[in-house]
Amino acid sequence: MAKKSLHLNISGMTCVNCSNAVEKVTKKLPGVLDSKVSFASAEGEFEYDDTLVEPEKIIAKIKKLGYGASKDVLEFEKQKLAHFNSLKRRLLVAAILAAVVMLLHKFTPFGSLNNWIIFILASIVQFYSGATFYTHAYSSLLNRNYDMNVLIALGTSAAYFYSLSVLFFGDFFPQSMRFVYFDGAVMIIAFVLLGNYLEERSKAKATNALEKLMDLSPKTANLLQDNQEVEVLASALQPDDIVVIRSGEGIPSDGVIIEGEAEINSAMLTGESMPVFKQVGDLVMAGTIVHTGFLKVRITKHSNETMLSNIVSLLASAQNQKMPIGRIADKISNIFVPTVVFISIGTFLLWWFFSGNLLVAFLTSISVLIISCPCALGLATPIAIVTAVGKGASMGILLKNPEVLEIMKEIKYAVFDKTGTLTKGEISIVHVSEELKPYLALIGSIESKSEHPISKSIVKYIKEQNIQFLDDEIPVQILSGKGIVGEFEDKKILLGNEALMHENDIKIDSKIFQEVSKAQQNGKGAVFAAINSKVIGYFLIQDCLKPEAKELIKSLKSKGITTAILTGDNEATAKHIAKEVDVDLVHAGVLPHEKLELIKTFSSNGKVLFVGDGINDALPLKQADIGIALKSGSDIAKDAGDIVLIGSDLRLVEKSLLLSFRTIRTIKQNLFWAFVYNIIGIPLAAGALYPAFGILLTPMYASMAMSISSVTVVLNALRLKWTKF
């Protein structure tokens, strides 16, 4: 036996039971050993014996069910687009014609022709807009997988074909039974298509996070051959190749520095808020950027073996492992649908057997089908979700994956990235020593020559003090990883870190040293200023905490949620931030794959919520049960997150939780009323009151009851729109 694996992208699935149906059907194929299909990621993994079955047979079987299947990503994207455009057209037709049908049903402007016009319009909706419900329902019945498609097909068919019978054979019906219910059928189809469209639209607009990650790595590299630079494809680089990288250029593959020094912006991989100084012997990673400096790097890994490539692989793995949350109505429908059919058939047989009246038997069985039409049940979840998505958007909360609302109440751990999430993600001057203030104009003139983030923060601070820079042309020398040196009126001015001072044999006054050391213990950094070999003062810098961070952490802890920080920044800074906001756990100096492993560890003890904003947060955002990304962050993070917060206000995290609690409560209320209505309505439609009271619920009143239940569910869901958070 030759065991092989087949990875397929599957389009057109509309519910969890769609993926279940694909699994069941493909497993029945001779030679298919295992089948795993994810509705959430629209992907399937199939293990098969290639001596018994060919991949084309598996693909053909899936397509026969009515879904698209492709090994090629580009072809899959075309299939998704075609499916989405088809859905949009069917919804548009259903919505317009349903509105016309409702108006014609109410005002009857065409007299005796009115019902015939309604019939023609309803038939278009039934057999064009609703066609996929019937094809999928047929496949589901064949595989004993009773989903919402079966419910929709059953309910709309009952309403449509009863109305059709009345229209064509009205004389065979008693006067009190000559009613048509085309409007109910078209409205069911229109509403369900609306829910499907809103879901598919969010998927269609979502960009591919994996492709964007790969785009971080430069496509070309400057390869050194015979002391000449040759531009080659980065993918063609081999271990031991030497490449040249200048300021502003990306590093094409993982390697080690053999010549030069530079400040490397690696925030997208490590989350560090400032560029990191690298020199000969240090490792550098693909996708990071040389901020300032010049490097010669010996390549150590092929392009498909770099850390960036590993992140891509891990992200894909996390995406596939994340199981979808089944819709409540889909889970119940496997019991509900056969039960309704059984009751309808039983009603027909009982009335026919005991009364001998075939027409009454037929009408009561139709009444059962109409009153149990899944409009209220089908709307219970999607209408609440649609309302919640709209409400969230109005508050600045974009729900990319509304299904996460269901598990928010189970969150045990709330884990945060530090830089740009709990903090502002920008360097600020928090203190300037008094001795330094008379020299700010000179310092600003020198620092304005540098593009380093620290220099920019100093320049910004000095400008905010309304201090004018000197007009003199001051020559400067920028020293990567150390600072900047300038000369003015026979004075040598040094601005930088402690290493720059020591390198120039400048002693730091004990008082200044103690003040700076104390500040550094509290997570602050320092920039020393020296003139002619004497330190005259210092700047204290810090990535400041967001003002609402403390409030959020306090609120989460009051709900019994354990809070944690995962960051690539140094331990002292991380612990200072953790202490300031009173976070329970802190892990510092962690790389993206280490963040992923920590999230997995947390997940083994309970549901995990992760909040982040950087590319380095893509893995934990995808791995966590709920990933919340800040819109102010990277596109990669936003693609990986289930929820995207517009802006960077952390109070929206708590509002997301509140929205979740109230949405799930509303869904449960809707489902409760939908089932109470069926529990009461179905016996009435079956004629339970007729023997004792002579009351028989006709299809007209069954349809009315069905409409009332639907209106109740919709109005209850719309309450979310007016709820204040």
Image (cartoon, rainbow, N blue to C red):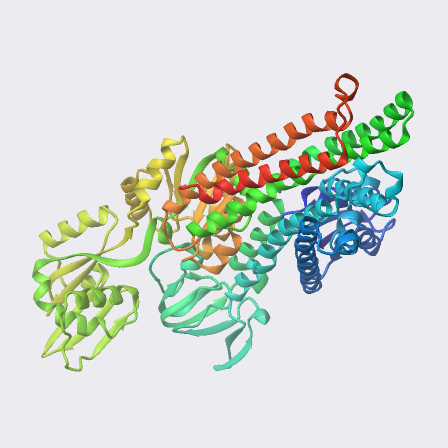
- Quarter occupied by the C terminus: top left
Q: Position of residue 646 (x, y in %)?
A: 42, 55
Q: Please determine whether, in this image, residue 373 is positioned above or below residue 567.
A: above
Of residues 531 and 701, the one nearer the viewer is 701
Residue 667 image position (x, y, % from top left): 56, 36
Q: How many marks?
A: 0
Q: Judge from the rendering whether residue 375 lies leftward or rightward of residue 449; answer left or right.
A: right
Q: Position of residue 224 (x, y in %)?
A: 50, 77
* Residue placed furthest toward the top: 692
* Residue drawn 23% across the image and 70% down it: 484
Is 629 drawn above or below residue 579 in the view shown?
below
Q: Nearer the viewer, residue 717 or 183?
A: 183
- The spot of residue 101 in percent (x, y) is 70, 53
Q: Is residue 158 visible?
A: yes
| Lateral position of residue 286 relative to residue 419, left or right | right
Is residue 67 something that shows in the picture? Answer: no
- In the figure, 169 relative to 425: above or below? above
Location of residue 272 by image quarter: bottom left
| Residue beneath the point at 26% across and 49% down | 523
Q: Quadrant of residue 499?
A: bottom left
| Residue at screen point 35% across, 68% down | 262
